[in-house]
Image (tube, rainbow, N blue to C red):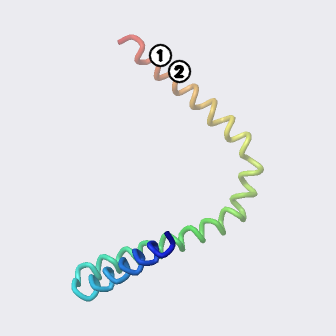
Amino acid sequence: MGLFKKLVFTAFLLLIGILFFISETFTEIAAGVAILLFGMIMLEEGFNAFVQGRLQQWLQCHCFRYLREVNHNGRTTVYGQGRKHSGR
């Protein structure tokens, strides 16, 4: 099974290399996808750095009260919408 995976992977890399050589459009699309993926990785690292700092401290202090308020507001909205449309 391991040898089969290595052969499939090698064939896949060879096919991509040939497509890079043959098609300029494929090269441009692959470059765009690479830039997109790189940007997503950088965004994830930045967000993780932010979350482990001030945001995490704020959430620990305010999370319970905030969730209680969201729960109350959500129930009030659902109740109000239900009363508004119940006459139909």
Relative side of 52 to 42, left or right: right
Relative side of 83 to 47, left or right: left
Residue 28 in sight from this viewpoint: yes
> In the rendered image of this protein, does residue 10 appear above or below residue 4?
below
> In the rendered image of this protein, does residue 46 appear above or below residue 22?
above
Residue 35 in sight from this viewpoint: no
Residue found at x 46% / y 77% = 6
Q: Quadrant of residue 42?
A: bottom right
- Disc tally is 2
Residue 15 is situated, as x and y percent measured from the top left of the image, at 31, 80
Q: Residue furthest top?
A: 87
Q: Which residue is mark 2?
A: 79
Residue 70 is situated, as x and y percent measured from the top left of the image, at 62, 36
Residue 29 is situated, as x and y percent measured from the top left of the image, at 30, 76
Residue nearest the observer in this picture, 35 or 88: 35
Q: What amino acid is labelled 1 in the image?
A: Arg
Q: Which residue is mark 1?
A: 83
User: Residue 28 shows which numbered tag?
Assistant: none
Residue found at x 50% / y 22% = 80
Residue nearest the observer in this picture, 20 or 30: 20
Q: What amino acid is labelled 2 in the image?
A: Tyr
Relative side of 61 to 44, left or right: right
Residue found at x 26% / y 78% = 26
Q: Secondary structure at mark 2?
A: helix
Q: Quadrant of residue 56?
A: bottom right
